[in-house]
């Protein structure tokens, strides 16, 4: 019971502790909520009792004790034997000969299964909290308008914004961005990531990262919470119907210079965001309302549109009796499957830098406990702000485009065509994400927005997330950045490493050698990503069979999809297609050997 009493300050609080039963001579606002100390370790749950007491619920954590810090016997053995994430990463990104050998054996399946389950198990499923509910509740479970979250918000009544550590006021976001994020000179990603990857990332993630600011804090418009291809088909039935041709399952399209492109908003009247000065006939209609922003997004929208209509033709040949609806629905499932296949085997494979060959095979999980459901988390949205990928200008064929000429320029798509754009984006290096000082001036306001949002949502400190994902909390800023200058600056701004915020922590952590980012981005990001991909219903035993995809032909389209086939089956001249810039060996970008076996 909370009583509103006269302010007795610290003395009142002490009196309270001494005389537990004295009613109403105590001031509640000076009693620190004990959960503000984040006392419960090892995923224990903090529950407040009375005014200043708490209990940690350590059920099934493998630990016991007041703060869930004492390991049970088996936990002790397990923790002793468990190698650190740094060790795994070291092994997986070295010894190519070893992994080439593993790839040819059944051990590969076992390791991929292990990677998928160990990662996915870090994500609560069914989901638990959201930004309005820091405790388990039916509303947090059932109201899918919220992004979920893995750690509850910092309680509202804590002494500092980050709990009890750090200063009373967090540093000015503008200062953080200017000091740590602003690019001086472009730093290319050492893993060779290119713009084809960067735009894929942006296109792919905007089907489920759809913050709905107007509704309040922590809401999403993406009610599918995963790979639903709402960025191709729209996120509601009305929009989908506007985009559909209602013939042979196909989507509406227009032909320009002999090639298929998305229809104009006049032909498919859906809400799209374009500046005033773009004429109606240059406004394309796509599943996602923001995709007019960049030619790279429109390029992918065009590729998936062509792929959809191509697969419809394939299905129609085998199933002449099927109506429009069945052709459409089955094609959508095939494209969802293709997307997951491409994301795991081309996109995540590239990003991980692993020599272990990843594999999209839902059967790997059929023998283990796994929940086929997913809810997009605020933390996943926050960490996926990979704007340092973006270069300072865009090189298309022989021409250079600065942001002013590139953004909302819908002519670029049709003037150059998909082939030339794929070719150009494949050749151009993307920026390194981790390590700081690599965000283009035009995008600094986005970084600022992330920090402001994380404060409104009261995200827990970076170190609490480290611990939640089985990583050791950093003890000093130098430990985090691995250098002197930035760590000193961070220290003076934040005061305490335990008060460092989530996004700055992720971006300013020292990167793995020759890698795009550091340990935390991988160890926290991969679980969200893999759970989201494998938690899709098409991966479940009831769905993962030929009939779901219209028979063996459709099933095979899913099982053999690749980024190269997505492009080359939908253009006339097949360019070199990859998520990394061409190395010297494959410099000849139009060699016939790059044509996939179709
Ligand atoms: C539990 O955590 C609190 C807050 O961090 C700390 O003050 C206390 O000493 C801890 N208790 C034990 C038994 O470890
Ligand atoms: C790995 O094995 C698969 C088949 O098991 C094969 O298709 C692929 O080319 C192999 N990859 C490497 C890098 O050896
Ligand atoms: C979800 O919660 C918000 C905020 O309370 C509310 O406005 C909305 O109607 C809820 N949605 C559903 C489907 O109940
Ligand atoms: C848009 O791109 C075209 C090339 O496709 C270029 O000629 C034009 O100048 C660009 N428009 C603007 C406003 O920069």
Image (tube, rainbow, N blue to C red):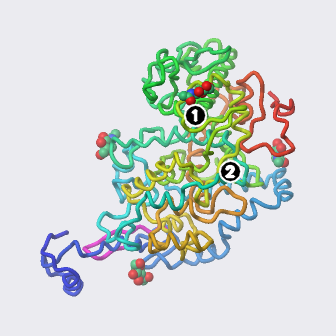
x and y percent of residue 33 in the render? 30, 72
Name the residue: 86% across, 55% down: 101
**Residue 41 in the figure: left or right of residue 533:** left
Instruction: Quickly name the residue at label 2.
Output: 351
Q: Secondary structure at mark 2?
A: helix
**Residue 470 in the figure: left or right of residue 271:** right
Name the residue: 33% across, 74% down: 34
Alpha-carbon neighbours of circle 1 within 10 Å: few (<14), some, or many (≥20)? some
Nearer to me, 116 or 456: 456
Quadrant where the C terminus is found in the figure: top right
Seen in the picture, residue 495 relative to 433 is either above or below; the reply is below
Q: Tag on residue 514?
A: none
x and y percent of residue 78 in the render? 63, 72
Q: Is mark 1 within 8 Å of ligand 4?
A: yes
Image quarter for residue 211?
Answer: top left
Which quarter of the frame holds ligand 3?
A: top left
Q: Closer to us: mark 1 or mark 2?
A: 1
**Residue 352 in the figure: left or right of residue 245:** right
> Can the viewer see residue 137?
yes
**Which tag, 1 or 2, sits closer to the chain's start?**
2
Nearer to me, 269 or 435: 435
Q: Secondary structure at mark 1?
A: helix
**Residue 262 in the figure: left or right of residue 511:** left
Magenta region, residue range:
43-55
Confirm whether the magenta stretch covers residue 559: no
x and y percent of residue 545 in the render? 66, 34
x and y percent of residue 469 in the render? 55, 63
Q: CA distance from mark 1 to mark 2?
A: 26 Å
> Can the viewer see residue 531?
no
Q: Tag on residue 406?
A: 1
């Amino acid at each position: 019971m909370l009583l509103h009493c006269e302010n007795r300050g610290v003395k009142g609080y002490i009196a309270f502790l001494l005389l537990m039963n004295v009613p109403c001579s105590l001031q509640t606002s000076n009693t620190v909520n004990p959960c503000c100390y984040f006392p419960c370790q090892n995923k224990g749950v903090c529950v407040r009792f009375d005014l200043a007491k708490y209990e940690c619920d350590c059920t099934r954590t493998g630990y016991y004790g007041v703060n869930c810090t004492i390991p049970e016997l088996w936990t002790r053995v397990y923790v002793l034997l468990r190698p650190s994430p740094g060790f795994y990463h070291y092994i997986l990104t070295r010894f190519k000969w070893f992994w080439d050998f593993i790839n040819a054996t059944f051990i590969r399946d076992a390791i991929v299964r292990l990677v998928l389950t160990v990662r996915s198990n870090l994500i609560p499923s069914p989901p638990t909290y959201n930004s309005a509910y820091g405790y388990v509740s039916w509303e947090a479970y059932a109201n899918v308008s919220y992004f979920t979250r893995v750690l509850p918000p910092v309680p509202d009544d804590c002494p500092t914004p980050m709990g009890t550590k750090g200063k009373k006021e967090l540093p000015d976001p503008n200062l953080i961005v200017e000091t740590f994020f602003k690019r001086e000179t472009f730093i290319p990603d050492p893993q060779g990531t290119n713009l084809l990857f960067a735009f894929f990332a942006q296109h792919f993630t905007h089907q489920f990262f759809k913050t709905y600011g107007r509704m309040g804090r922590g809401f999403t418009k993406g009610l599918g919470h995963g790979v639903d291809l709402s960025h191709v088909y729209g996120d509601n039935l009305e929009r989908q119907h506007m985009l559909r041709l209602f013939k042979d399952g196909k989507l509406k399209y227009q032909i320009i210079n002999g090639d298929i492109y998305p229809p104009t908003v006049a032909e498919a009247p859906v809400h799209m965001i374009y500046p005033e000065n773009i004429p109606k006939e240059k406004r394309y209609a796509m599943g996602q309302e923001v995709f007019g922003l960049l030619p790279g997004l429109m390029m992918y929208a065009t590729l998936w549109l062509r792929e959809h209509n191509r697969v419809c033709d394939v299905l129609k040949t085998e199933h002449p009796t099927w109506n429009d609806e069945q052709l459409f629905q089955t094609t959508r499932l095939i494209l969802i499957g293709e997307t997951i296949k491409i994301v795991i085997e081309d996109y995540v494979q590239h990003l991980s830098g692993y020599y272990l060959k990843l594999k999209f095979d839902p059967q790997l999980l059929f023998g283990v406990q796994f929940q086929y459901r997913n809810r997009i988390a605020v933390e996943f949205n926050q960490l996926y702000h990979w704007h340092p990928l973006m270069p300072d200008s865009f090189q298309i064929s022989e021409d250079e485009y600065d942001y002013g000429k590139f953004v909302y320029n819908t002519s670029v798509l049709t003037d150059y065509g998909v082939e030339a754009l794929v070719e150009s984006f494949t050749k151009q290096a993307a920026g390194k994400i981790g390590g700081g000082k690599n965000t283009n001036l035009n995008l600094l306001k986005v970084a600022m927005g992330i920090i402001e949002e994380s404060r409104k949502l009261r995200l827990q400190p970076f170190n609490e997330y480290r611990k939640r994902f089985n990583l050791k909390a950093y003890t000093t800023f130098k430990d985090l950045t691995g250098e002197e200058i930035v760590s000193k600056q961070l220290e003076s701004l934040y005061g305490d490493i335990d008060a460092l915020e989530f996004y700055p922590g992720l971006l300013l952590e020292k990167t793995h050698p020759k890698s795009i980012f550091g340990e935390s981005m991988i160890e926290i990001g991969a679980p969200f990503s893999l759970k989201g991909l494998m938690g899709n219903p098409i991966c479940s035993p009831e769905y993962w069979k030929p009939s779901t995809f219209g028979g063996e032909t459709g099933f095979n389209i899913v099982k053999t999809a690749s980024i190269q086939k997505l492009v080359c089956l939908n253009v006339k001249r097949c360019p070199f297609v990859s998520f990394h810039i061409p190395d010297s060996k494959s410099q000849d970008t139009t060699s016939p050997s790059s044509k996939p076996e179709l």
